Image: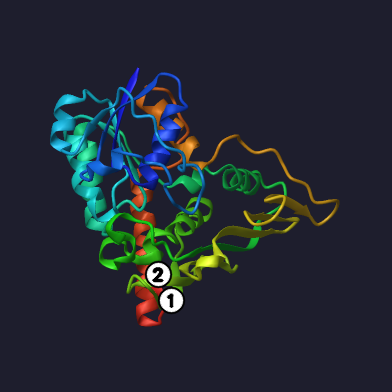
Amino acid sequence: MIRVGIAGLGFMGKMHFRCYQALEGVQVAAICDTDAAKFEGQGGAVGNIEGAEAPLDLTGIGLYDDFDRMLAEAELDALSVTLPTYLHRPYTVQALEAGLNVLCEKPMALTVEDGRAMVAAAEASGKRLQIGHCIRFWPEYAAAKELIDAGRYGRVTAATFQRLSLTPSWSWQNWILDGSKSGGAAVDLHIHDSDYVQYVFGMPQAVFSRAARGPSQDYDHIVTQYLFAEDRPITAEGSWSLAPTFGFEMSFNIVLEKATLVFDVSRAPVFKVCPREGEAFTPEVAAGDGYSNEIEHFVRAVRGERVAEIITPEQSIDSLKLVLAEKRSAASGELVWL
């Protein structure tokens, strides 16, 4: 039995709880949150993706408002760090030094220095550190990468990614809308697509971005062009500056020589392959969602099973480097080389 703890019972903490509870051989043994009121009547968690709305059954789970005491008493094998981004480094490092495997939510940290400290702690402890870049595990995004890698439809000639949201007003103490704590939409939201660009195409040679400041007083709407040795337009747009009635959309259009891959959560079907010859079709994709699939992957690795290398801590640092370069480009109005 893998005994898991969760640090932070906000939207993502509840999402991780749901995913762990669905797995055999896993027990959520302890939850820590400095706001003990979250343990009472904790339904109605809000986020861009559904799945954490129902009240949690916390029967038999150790509930803590002191992180040190949880580490000392709960006899954990692994921990999910689902705290605000500015707290990722200290809690991740402390858990790793205590001998726990750690799944830390994205973005890894606010600075590359903090990310490197987390990697160093994992290497020193010999424990697993996985960053929650769930889009790499999202069934449609995973299927798109498989189709690209297979080469059946030729090379990618262009790609556009979008992730657009109403302004997130649901976070604890409104930390998300404090750019000094979240990094703004560029670091908190848009990094999903920056990371996927890196996953599919590798690190670009340079980036060119335009961005607008928004409610976080940081870059809350950003559009980036990723430049590679091969001349092809790869762009991504991320925003949480949209009106409350807009809701949330995530999508991509990936143009290959012989087909176009289309994904849009606001359409039906949400995913389809449009060949240049023949009818469009929706291929089979893996079950679940990005959250459940990444957590199953983490648990299997903690058990010592051989798993595919889908995300590494070093790649998570690269994604942070990438989005920070985008912010520098937006600030300077110039191309930034990586």
- Residue closer to the observer: 24 or 282: 24
Q: Residue furthest front?
A: 41
Instruction: Estimate the x, y position of residue 267 in percent, counting from the top left.
Output: 69, 56
Q: Residue furthest right?
A: 278
Left or right of 304 in this view: 286: right
8 to 163, vertically: above or below: above
Instruction: Estimate the x, y position of residue 161 in percent, counting from the top left.
Output: 56, 62
Identified by mark 1, the residue type is Ala
Give the image's coloring scheme.
Answer: rainbow
Which residue is painted at 18% across and 47% down in the image?
90
Left or right of 64 in this view: 179: right
329 to 65, vertically: above or below: below
Looking at the rendered image, the quarter that the N terminus falls into is top left
149 to 227, vertically: above or below: above
Q: Do we see residue 31 in this rendering? A: yes
Q: Residues within 10 Å of mark 2 (few under 14, many from 20)?
A: many
Which residue is painted at 23% across and 41% down in the image?
36
Left or right of 218 in this view: 71: left
Per the rendering, the mark at residue 211 is 1
